[in-house]
Image (cartoon, helix red, strand yellow):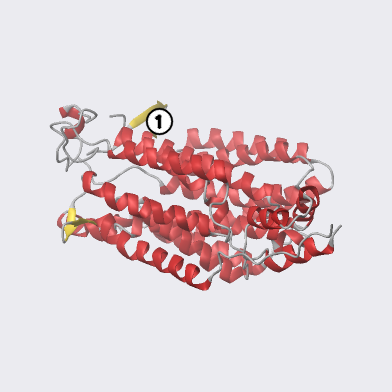
Amino acid sequence: MLPELARLGPITVGTHDFFTILGLLAGFVLYYRALRRDRMLGPQITLISVAAIVGGALGARLITSWEILDEVNAANLPVSYVLTHGPRSILGGLAGGYLAIVLTKRALGYRISTGDYYAAAIPLALAIGRVGCFLSELPLGTPTSLPWGMTVSPEAAAAFLRCPGCDGPMHPSMLYEIGFHLTALAIIIRRGPLLPVRGDTLRAYLLAYGLFRFGIEFVRGNEVQWGGLTGPQLVLIPLVALLVIHFVRQLRSGIYRMPQPLPAVA
Amino acid sequence: MDPRIEEYIQKNRGIYTRDALRQQLIAAGHDPGAVDAALDRMGAGSPAASRPTGWRPRWREFLVLVALGAIGAFFVWAGEMYGAGGIAPVVYVILVSVAWGVAKAVSIAIDSGSSRGAAILLAVLGAGAAVMSLTSGLSIIGLAVAASAALVAGLLFFFGRRNPQTAGAIGAALPIVAWLVVTGTCYAPLVG
């Protein structure tokens, strides 16, 4: 485990923080390049992008805050602790960012879908960010007897209040996720927009990630919250349902059958 | 130029991607070069891109930025021991106002042909902020300002005079984004 990447005088560079920022910057570069290619750059799109990051930061904290409320109360900490020091979830980050984009666009009267410009940036940012999780967070996953199960030292496990399965080989669930994001990134970069309608490539990626994440939660090692499901799985049910409803509506509307242009004059 | 190409793009660009429009037009027998030229000229589907994008800060955009950022700043800092949650939105609003002004000044400086001067000024400001942060205990905010200034300076060198509006917009966004990111990603979960 490597919770601290480096110490520069009084400054401690946290591994998780470093890879989070690195992921954001790398994602920003891809996002910027895509916008520039299509001549979409402008002050409005910059504001929308800033709103996405702010919304993402808030959503990441808010969506999982309920999970630790009991622990916070027991420790006599202020409720605001869950927002400042609670766990963060990328699912909340994605949902918060998405919501912030929608609201900001509405406020600015900006009607064009910009989702596809995030379609490659998000998997890249998440793949890099997950490296930070893998290096600094426990448990890695549920116990496993598979040959690629990974173990950690007792000292590393002792640093975490809750570390089930840390006394033996665990699923490297974060590596599974990195593999998913890198595969998605390769497909999106290689094939370009997967669907003809603006924004639907991003939604398709989010739907695929939602389903993948729901499955990977069974080997992730997160606490079961209700009905045998973990917190992220409970959050994913409505989010995935919304995406499924969107695609059903799109298919029923026939929007994927593009209008035919008039043929060229010979 | 076949007017039917532009007519088709104009009619469908709000819904369909650039690639999808291109494929449909080429499949209908249109010259790929003419299709690409039309897509480039029409900004590939962006009403924002098809009209002038001069640096025109509007109060509504400013308010959106201020409101979202102030709420974010409050939540990010709300649990700090020294009650920073109350003052964080105020600090943020001051910061965003300064960033907005800097971005506009930078944009004007580039327009008048002096991006190098603006970049050097920002680099000096960044270095000063870094020194202050190391000597006065304002490490996080100072470093965020320093990093932002350095990034903006680098971007200004990169963009030069080619795209002053974009450089100005990024100039406005980066200090705010860097500040939020640095203060919002502290690694302090409930661990022993």
Q: Quadrant of residue A72?
A: bottom left
Quadrant showing the N terminus of chain A? top left
Q: Is residue A217 above or below residue A153?
A: below
Quadrant showing the C terminus of chain A? bottom right
Chain of the residue under the numbered disc 1 shown in the image: A
Point out residue A38 in the picture as x, y percentages from the top left corner. 68, 51
Point out residue B59 in the picture as x, y percentages from the top left corner. 65, 68
Q: Is residue A9 above or below residue A187?
A: above
Q: Is residue B97 visible?
A: no
Point out residue B94 in the picture as x, y percentages from the top left corner. 57, 57
Q: Residue at x 84, y 43 (%)?
A: B113
Q: Is residue B68 visible?
A: yes
What residue would you read off at disc 1?
A: A10
| Amino acid, disc 1 | Pro
Depth check: give the residue in front, A189 or B52.
A189
Secondary structure type for disc 1: loop
Q: Residue at x 40, y 52 (%)?
A: A208
Q: Residue at x 47, y 60 (%)?
A: A98
Depth check: give the residue in front, A244 or B109.
A244
Depth check: give the residue in front, A27 or A19.
A27
Task: Say whether residue B191 is left or right of residue A248.
Answer: left
Task: Say whether residue B36 is left or right of residue A179.
Answer: right
Q: Quadrant of residue A107?
A: bottom right
Point out residue B149 in the picture as x, y percentages from the top left corner. 62, 41
Mark 1 residue crowding within 10 angstroms, few (<14) / some (14–19) / many (20+): few
